[in-house]
Image (tube, rainbow, N blue to C red):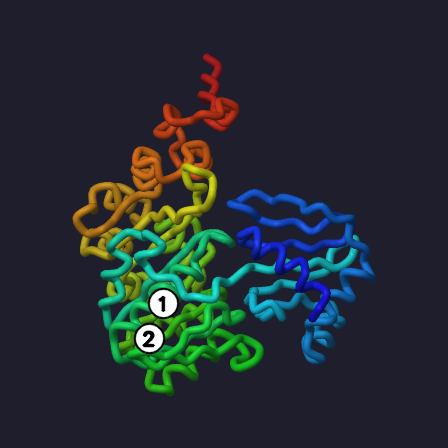
Amino acid sequence: MARIDAFLKLGTQQGCSDIHLAVGVPPMLRMNGDLIPIKFRELRDTELESYITEILTPNQSDYFLRGNDLDFSYVSAEGGRFRVNVYRKDTGVGATFRTIPSDVPTLDSLKLPPIVKKLCDYHQGMILVTGSTGTGKSTTLAAMIDLLNSSRKLNIISLEDPIEFVHRSKQSQVIQRELGNHIPSFAEGVRAAMREDPDVILVGELRDAATIRMAMTAAETGHLVLGTLHTTGAVKTIDRMIDALPAEEREQTKGFLAQSLLAVVTQVLCKTADGRGRKAICEVLVMTKAIAKLIMTDQTHQIPSQLQTGREFGMQMLDQALIAAVQAKEVDPDDAFIYATEKRALQKFVTDTTLLARLEAPAAMPPS
């Protein structure tokens, strides 16, 4: 058993989401959003590097020794599965292990908005799940793939960096390919997938213009494309898609979004009211003729008003969802306040009054 497995076992027993190992500090666990050190001495450089080297393949070790960061999946001797990032910093090496549950979650267990399940009924177009790092995007996509896998006879091709949840083929065939091991890039992975008779293509991250362009092509040519972006709202997602491609492709990109983008689901993870877990709270955009027109006429700044009034289509603003979750006693009101865009709407629910300092002070009046 690799020595690092002892730390990983402790983390999984505690129910943490991440285990952090870095030189100069003791191992730390991410517990319900908070980073907590465990009772252990500070890790030394050569010590930690030897721990990490034990779990690397020769190719991974060579790549890391050349000064590169590493992303890979790891299964410990205790049976736990982890997404790993290994890096170097000023004091030495470091690693972050994200725990991956052995069972693929369901959309019902995640208690996501009902519209997310309905989106899985589509046969063509693009669905984007967005949010900052660690907000559960991969978990939501895994649950969507599991629903498709369980209910429809499809060829599902998943392109990941690295492979996280392992899907067993049920009604569908699920093919999982990993960046670096099976495909050289996401763009090349999508290009290859389109020659493999796919019904659904999952793209782990739309991280560059080439990947976005290929994913758009796949969505336009009769496939259902699921993907992620590191954006923190529906409007920012649309703007990012438009700005990611060259100026001469701007009109074409707007046309794609208006015709083939099905929905944007943006997530944050809030502490539950009892403090024992976290719950995904979502902003949801569902494409309508009105939103398509706003995109085509460069008026994306008006999309939030469509989200506020689009409940009949399953749409909601993040702040609306946060308020509803606080009123239902599903999430911690202080955590909801931190994630809110318009914080004054949640001010009356706050229990930690020091947070109210985050409210913006009134702008100073200009001199007369």
Q: Report x, y in % for residue 340.
A: 40, 37
Name which residue lies at 34% across and 69% down.
Answer: 146
Q: Quadrant of the C terminus?
A: top left
- Return the mark for residue 200: 2
For residue 247, side relative to residue 198 (left or right): right
Q: Secondary structure at mark 1?
A: strand
Name which residue lies at 31% across and 33% down.
Answer: 327
- In the image, residue 32 sits, relative to residue 257, either above or below, namely above
Other residues around mark 2 within 10 Å, as few (<14) / some (14–19) / many (≥20): many
Q: Report x, y in % for residue 180.
A: 57, 77
**Closer to the camera in the image, 215 or 356:** 356
| 2 or 1: tag closer to the N-terminus | 2
Q: Report x, y in % for residue 164.
A: 50, 68
For residue 358, side relative to residue 36 (left or right): left
Q: Secondary structure at mark 2?
A: strand
Q: Is mark 2 in CB contact (under 8 Å) with mark 1?
A: yes
**Closer to the camera in the image, 3 or 337:** 3
Spatial separation of the CA atoms under disc 2 and disc 1: 8 Å
**What amino acid is at disc 2?**
Val
**Closer to the camera in the image, 339 or 1:** 1
Provide the residue designation for mark 1: 226
For residue 166, side relative to residue 86 (left or right): left
Q: Quadrant of residue 347?
A: top left
